[in-house]
Amino acid sequence: MTKARETGFAAPPAQFDLPGIEHGIIELWTSYAVESRSLHGRRPSEEPGAAGAEASQPQFVFYDGPPFATGLPHFGHLLAGTIKDVIPRYWAMNGYAVERRFGWDCHGLPIESLVEDELDVHGRAEIEALGVPKFNAACRAGVMRYTQEWRTVVQRMGRWVDFDNDYKTMDPTFMESVWWVFSQLWEQGRIYEGHRVQPVSPLLGTPLSNFEVAQGPQERNPKTGKDGHKLRDDPSLTLRFELEDEPGTFLWAWTTTPWTLPSNLALAVHPEVEYVKVRVVETGELAWIEPGLLAQYQARNRVGETEELARCKGSELVGLAYAPLLPYFAEYREREDGSRWAFRVVSADYVTTETGTGIVHQAPAFGEDDFEIGQREGLPLIRPMDLNGVFDERVPEVAGMRAKDADKTIIKLLKDAGKVVDHDVYRHAYPHCYRTDEPLLYMAISTWFMRVEDMREELLANNDQIHWVPERVGSARFGNWLAGARDWNLSRNRYWGTPLPLWRCDEDPSDIVCIGSIAELERRAGLSPGSIDDLHRERVDDITFASDKTPGGTMRRISEVFDCWFESGSMPYAQNHYPFDPAKKQYVEDNLPADFIAEGLDQTRGWFYTLHVLASALFGRPAFKNVVVNGLILAADGKKMSKRLKNYPDPMEVVEAFGADALRAYLISGPVVRAEPMRFGRDANDSEGLVVRDMVKAAILPLQNAFNFLVTYARADGWVPSAETLAARPATRPQAELDRWILSRVQSFVAELRGEFEAYNLDNLVPAWLGMCDELNNWYIRRGRRRYWRGADEGDGDKAEAYATLYRVLVTIAHCMAPVLPFFCEHLYQRLVVDLGLAEGDNGDSVHLQRFPVVDEELIDPVLEGQVAQVRKVVGLAMALREGERIGVRRPLPSLTVASRDPEVRAAVQRFAADIEGELNVKTIELAQDDADLVTLSAKANFKVLGRKLGKKMKVVAKAVEQLDAATLRAVLDGGSVEVEGETLGADDLVLRREPLPGRVADSDGEITVVLDTTIDAALEQEGLARELINRIQNLRKAADLDVSDRIELAVECAAGGKLSGALEREDLRGLIEGETLARSLAVNSGRELDHRGQDEIDGETLGLSLAKSS
RNA sequence: GGGCGUGUAGCUCAGCUGGUUAGAGCGCCGCCCUGAUAAGGCGGAGGUCGGAGGUUCAAAUCCUCCCACGCCCA
């Protein structure tokens, strides 16, 4: 380190290799345990092994949403991971201790499905035959299979998160806390047993999740042309139900599931639809049906001619009682009090008049609509079959038969009884089992619910305390969801999950005990303390104990496990084994709610919701204060990223090609960090992630170039920063306006970044940097270049300030972009500070252990910043004029005139006249207030202002305004007014436009008009030629691979008497050339041929150049 | 089927409570600059603002309907 101090900056590498730099930085972080020091909130001067400082530091609380580790990380994970890294890094740099524990979601369907495939056991019967212990052991062994890959990828992306102190939802401590959470809800009376209609795969004997249903066989529907569930032919059965009070009159009802007919308990009609009572002429039968559908039956010759007897709305049919179709469950005809219970007409809005009869058979235990109607009407739930769809003894004719197989028998039974009006075939899309290909059966299944509906107001009130990014997700999407929150079905009929801690008496099903801890279970079951070391089903299902309430009753655990969202929502408590771990209890309570979480939009109803519901129920407050919601990342072609289609590049290949910093910057630069979808790619064909390379070019290379610039000249000049240079604010304000400006600009940039970070607006961070970067490279360094490039004895004071200023700027940028570009900023910090022995501690200092820059208001000069912006606008206009005239910038021009009525603009131009002259290569700058002889003025109406005043008169006035002449407009500009169509208009009512007068090389932008004088006399022409010559010589120097500071001998051959030789005769220009190219000698037409030779051409004159390195 | 969102240049996106030349970046083409530059600057081409109605003096913007896509729910 001492050596580095003596020698200053190391030579910049010839090649820029961001991935290579990043690997070096990872090694650095590893060898000095930088990551762990940051995670534990230590300052650079503290030893890695020293006691943690977190106790004395304020906490910034972050929760990590757990991913499933059953697959490898994709871009969505990398995006969320980047967000989860950037924000904590910022707060860590502001002195907060930010605990970042990685979370693993271990339970649930994905891993169970995977294991089912691997073991080739499917469904309840096979899994139970294999044995839950074996099945769960396989899940346990498989669920963490990719943890190492995750760790590698996450580390490579530069995300700092604690993998050693992670949490897993399958840890016994985690699961015990989940039990505790549940027991709290139980004590609040929030848990109840209910039913819910779910799709069941009969062969598997298990209910399927939506996810599994969606995986079932798909088929294109020829009618709609869309993919959907596989089509199947089901019986279409029209049946006659006889009215009890009007024997001989029937309701014609329709179904496609004859196997549900034994469980029929009602018929549904639409209250607003009209029905008719008809007599079938041929048979004399009297029947109710919807008339349009009757016509369809008749068109198909299923029903003969009819005559209409009556007509009424469905609502008038509601309440009619009918005789049971089949002789089952007749006991539900009336309640004990004699009121009508089942077998009656009910009203249902979902009934359509597209198919069937307009009267629909209802079996509340089958089908969601039926279930809901049944609940509303208080109908019993009759499900005479098990989960395999096998009928029980309650329907003797089909007992032991499987549901779909029973269809034929039931139809025959009904035909024999004369109950069938029509028997047809109905082709429709229907969900099938993804595994067995069988049609699924929808049936009501017992499940456990958490009462949420009565919490809606509290949920909404707590939501008001959350800062959502973007806001609309919280107010609209999440808010609406909370406002309509339904009770949460939190049990699943699965195996690998946290078991519901409910034990039920085998003698009395209402005798239930909820167990809230391992100790309680051990005590009740008479087990020795500490004997239960795991809570999975194979460990707890067999534990029984005697009932307290029911003499002789034995308590056995119910079979269900938790919806794994319940576990995710419990993580704030469960990750710290709350409330069982006395060391962490207070810590958890003190740090509720979290300061920050981030996940994808798909978690609105997932993790965000479950966190919120549980925190509201348990602690009466939200679970988090700030949440950043990211959108989905699509492939470059706009489709979902799909492994099969290979429509996206491998994330790690992108990282190794272009760098993790570039990928991070790209990912957080768009609306995807505001919950909008993003296409990953430059265009539809970008399969390599070229957008990421674009980000290298835009955000990282310019910074690298600025750094290289400093190093190149500092080395040539032997300039080395001192501890004083490191301070963000110089001891004395620099003399040069340029330095004062860039210092101000950098402080404004720091303020801008701080604002964005604290508003959790990630998408503005990189654009803000790109703006700063442009100012640094394309103005500060570009304009300041000559301050560095001059002899050691010239202008020493200014040169030292120039170095110090650029150095300060780069160090500040390295600090404040570090959260976003952790690798490259670390690289800069190491090269700029640590390598030079200027670091705070000697134990591997890192920019990430530094404090985020605090805005230094003293350095901010808004007027100066505004003026430079005006100056850059002037330069831009003038550059465009040169372009239009095809006069290269190397050719000097006599003058530029800047005319503006705005005194600020004139002041700016005056102040920076030298910079404008240098930048534009003009000899003088003229200022003018009046542009009357430069431009023609014209005006348009200011619609925004006038529209409100004038209304319908707007159009006439607008037209008249366009006719106003320049003199009138000038008068208005000078504070006057003008009468148009009876309206008095002032300057604010008009929008002025300036058009350069023909014949002038001029242009205008708003209040600024610039005019370029393009007359080139002989002297200027010669100077231009000299500068062309310098350019050619510099190119030759470069081609000869000379060092910037190498001196040369130079020889030029050109046509005697030509313009070039004329220029070379001028002593001042020869001096200029020699100075610029570091030539010790300049021989013209001497016939000498030096080591490096080149032929060139300027303005049509050929010339020969040769040069040699001077010894 | 419902909730929320998206649709603007070849691509990625800005366009606030309506206001008259609809912008930026990238890409493309042309020119220019450069001894820090795998860079940079300037200019150009490129848009029926998803479609159709409506409100208004005025609609990319507000309303209605439709189409396409996405997430979630059913």
Image (cartoon, helix red, strand yellow):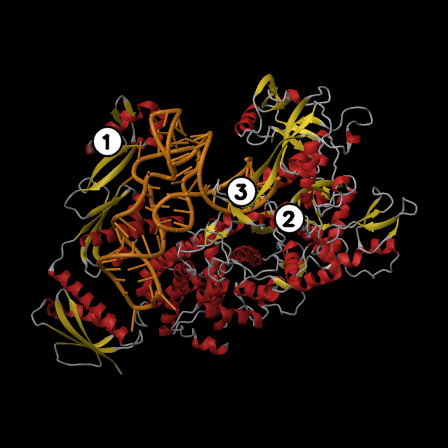
Q: Which quarter of the rendered picture does the C terminus of chain A lie within?
A: bottom left
Taking the image as shown, residue A879 lies to the left or right of residue A634, namely left
Quarter assignment of residue A389: top right
Q: Chain of mark 3?
A: A
Residue projecting furthest to the left: A1057
State the image coordinates of residue A281 (x, y, percent, origin top left): 59, 20
Report, in whole angstroms, how far the alpha carbon at label 2 lies from the one at label 1.
68 Å
Q: Residue furthest top?
A: A309
Pointer 2 or 1: first along the chain: 2
Q: Which residue is mark 3?
A: A471
Query: Which secondary structure lies at badge 3?
Result: helix
Q: CA distance from mark 3 to mark 1?
A: 44 Å
| A640 or A849: nearer the viewer | A640
Q: What numbered label is drawn on residue A209?
A: 2
Find disc 1 in the rendering and name its residue.
Answer: A962
Q: Nearer the viewer, mark 2 or mark 3?
A: 2
Q: Are marks 2 and 1 on the same chain?
A: yes
- Give the residue type at disc 2: Ser
Mark 1 chain:
A
Residue A71 is left or right of residue A706, and the answer is right
| Mark 2 or mark 3, earlier in chain | 2
Three-letter code, disc 1? Glu
